[in-house]
Amino acid sequence: MRKSAWITLKHQVKQAASQKTIFAFCLKKSLKLLRLTDYEDEIELQMHPRPHYGYCLLASAKLAKKLGISEISAIEFGVAGGNGLISLEYHARRIEEITGVQIQIYGFDLSDGLPEPQDYRDLPYHFQQGHFQMNFEELHSKLTRSKLVIGDVKNTVKEFFYVHQPSRIGALFFDLDYYSSTRDALEILKADPNHFVPRVFCYFDDVVGGVKELYNDYTGERLAINEFNAQNNSVKLGVPYYLRSQSNTRWKDMIWIAHFFNNEKYNATST
Ligand SMILES: C[S@@+](CC[C@H](N)C(=O)[O-])C[C@H]1O[C@@H](n2cnc3c(N)ncnc32)[C@H](O)[C@@H]1O
């Protein structure tokens, strides 16, 4: 089969498999059994838990590789039971195999669940104090490589680079629920720009929701993003319009890119 015909066929099969039907489900299983998909296809077809974690981490590792960066860090803000970190560990393993870029993983959490909401901006009509408690011992025994950073992000973010000496940060996953906690976690972007890959993939968990949450630009994570952009000039959280234009799945509307304009590698060719 000619290469272009094969690419068209693969595209059509992927389109069919991306639907939410029983046929699509069976097609995905068959593609996997026959080893006709690679990791990137599997992310696109949502064949792993949290494909958005894999997408951000892979994009970041690929960028790092092009820029000659051999190791990156990924952070999840808001760990709770740890399912996100466990998923991140899986994706990191796969991505290290593909790209050769090594990945460190950090998880920030208070460990005793959501704190008291500060005001209406923390959406107390939806989130309540004490939700999402962590069982530290149990989680610690399940994790294979992630490091837990326990405490209020307001404090732990300030000490992070000094205490942990992480490799350049390439991906950030925000799942702290509140406006106030997300605002405090975003302070990390104000550190030395060379602590980061020049463009960092950021996922925000609470920006779309549904009729119960009614997430909007004036409260919650979206307000924290908007305020950050209004107050900072050398780092901006930009919308990746290419993803918005192919929004066949909700997580593509939940990613922003932190651009570090003063990063020493920001202008280096990466395409
Ligand atoms: C929705 S849960 C995280 C769920 C997790 N990402 C997952 O996918 O399983 C939110 C977490 O954010 C943490 N959190 C909220 N505000 C915080 C703060 N100011 N500092 C540290 N952790 C905070 C809470 O302790 C809670 O465990």
Image (cartoon, rainbow, N blue to C red):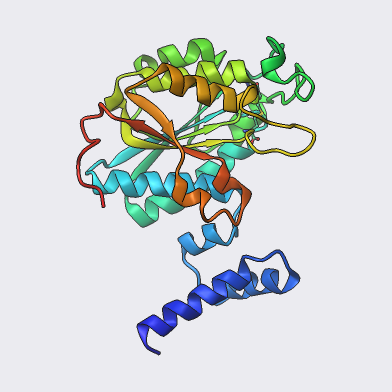
The residue most toward the bottom is 1
Q: Position of residue 92 (x, y in %)?
A: 45, 46
Judged left or right of residue 270, residue 184 is right
Q: Which of 39 and 186 is in front in this view?
A: 186
Judged left or right of residue 136, residue 163 is left
Image position of 209 with respect to 48: above or below? above
Labels in figure, total: 0
Q: Nearer the viewer, residue 146 or 216?
A: 216
Q: Where is residue 95 in the image (x, y as percent from the top left)?
A: 42, 51
Q: Say if residue 2 shows up in the picture.
A: yes
Image position of 191 with respect to 155: above or below? below
Q: Which of 187 and 38 is in front in this view?
A: 187
Residue under the image location 49 percent in, 76 percent down: 10
Judged left or right of residue 202, residue 270 is left
Q: Say if residue 32 shows up in the picture.
A: no
- Residue 258 lies in what quarter of the image? top left
- Residue 25 lies in what quarter of the image? bottom right
